[in-house]
Image (cartoon, rainbow, N blue to C red):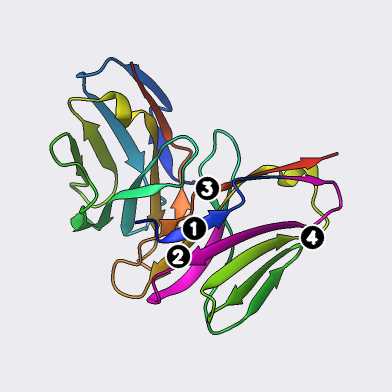
Amino acid sequence: EAGVAQSPRYKIIEKRQSVAFWCNPISGHATLYWYQQILGQGPKLLIQFQNNGVVDDSQLPKDRFSAERLKGVDSTLKIQPAKLEDSAVYLCASSLQPGNTIYFGEGSWLTVV
Amino acid sequence: QQQVKQSPQSLIVQKGGISIINCAYENTAFDYFPWYQQFPGKGPALLIAIRPDVSEKKEGRFTISFNKSAKQFSLHIMDSQPGDSATYFCAASTKGSARQLTFGSGTQLTVLP
């Protein structure tokens, strides 16, 4: 069974530029999550989708971050404009339903210079 | 306010020894406590999980001990191997439709050969 796919794996951008990350969850998984993992810290939830609807985006900095899951399958996370403190690994994860095991992708590493 | 506190931040153990990582939580609504293992460049992967109706769960060399009254749980790795060298995260989630994970800050385990 294919895992959670993410791209790009690595991205270096200058501050104030924009970047987008793509995620394809495990087939059939209705719940999709985006986490931010700053070096040396645990993952922090940014947004949770159930199918194509947002369940929780309370920790998403909405002035610069946006995310969508238009057809209830793959998802994109966008940052515009990026700040230095956005340097982190952006992890996409999925589960069959809320409460089921959460499977993580390998992450997209962002460095803002 | 951090809801799941994890210690130690780093741990060095000799091959064959026992690795112990501790976590404490504040939110009494948490009812699911997983441990994730993360290798460099990879996403976290579920290792073992426990619910508060049991005090211990064992899977192979990995054991979770749970103390509901103290609001603490710990991961024990018996007969630690160099291949166990990774970062370990405890996490917790509550009941409800969202079932989001709150992660600890992580423990970097190094098992010396």
Report the residue marked by disc 3: B44
Query: What is the three-letter code of the residue carrying label 4?
Result: Met
**Of discs 1 and 2, which sits in the foreground?**
1
**Of discs 3 and 2, which sits in the foreground?**
2
Residue B77's tag is: none
Q: Where is residue B18 in the image (x, y as percent from the top left)?
A: 79, 57
> Marks 1 and 4, how far apart in space?
22 Å
Report the residue marked by disc 1: B5
Parent chain of label 4 = B
| Secondary element type, mark 4 | loop
> Marks 3 and 2, how far apart in space?
14 Å
Do residues under tags 2 and 4 come within 8 Å of each other at their CB atoms?
no
**Of discs 1 and 4, which sits in the foreground?**
1
Q: Are marks 3 and 2 in one subunit? A: yes
Question: Measured along the vertical axis of the image, is residue B90 above or below residue A105?
Answer: below
Query: What is the three-letter code of the residue carrying label 1?
Result: Lys
| Secondary element type, mark 1 | strand
> Marks 3 and 1, how far apart in space?
18 Å
User: Quick one: label 1 or label 4, which is nearer the N terminus?
Assistant: 1
Q: Which of A96 and A108 is in front in this view?
A: A108
Q: Position of residue A34 (x, y in %)?
A: 33, 46
Residue at image point 24% right, 52% down:
A72
> Marks 1 and 2, how far apart in space?
11 Å
Query: What is the three-letter code of the residue carrying label 3?
Result: Pro
Q: Are marks 2 and 4 in one subunit? A: yes
Q: Is residue B17 magenta?
A: yes
Report the residue marked by disc 4: B78
Do residues under tags 3 and 1 come within 8 Å of each other at their CB atoms?
no
* Mark 3 neighbour class, 10 Å CA radius: few under 14, some 14 to 19, many 20 or more: many
Report the residue marked by disc 2: B92
Residue at image point 55% right, 33% down:
B41
Question: Which residues make up the magenta segment?
Answer: B12-35
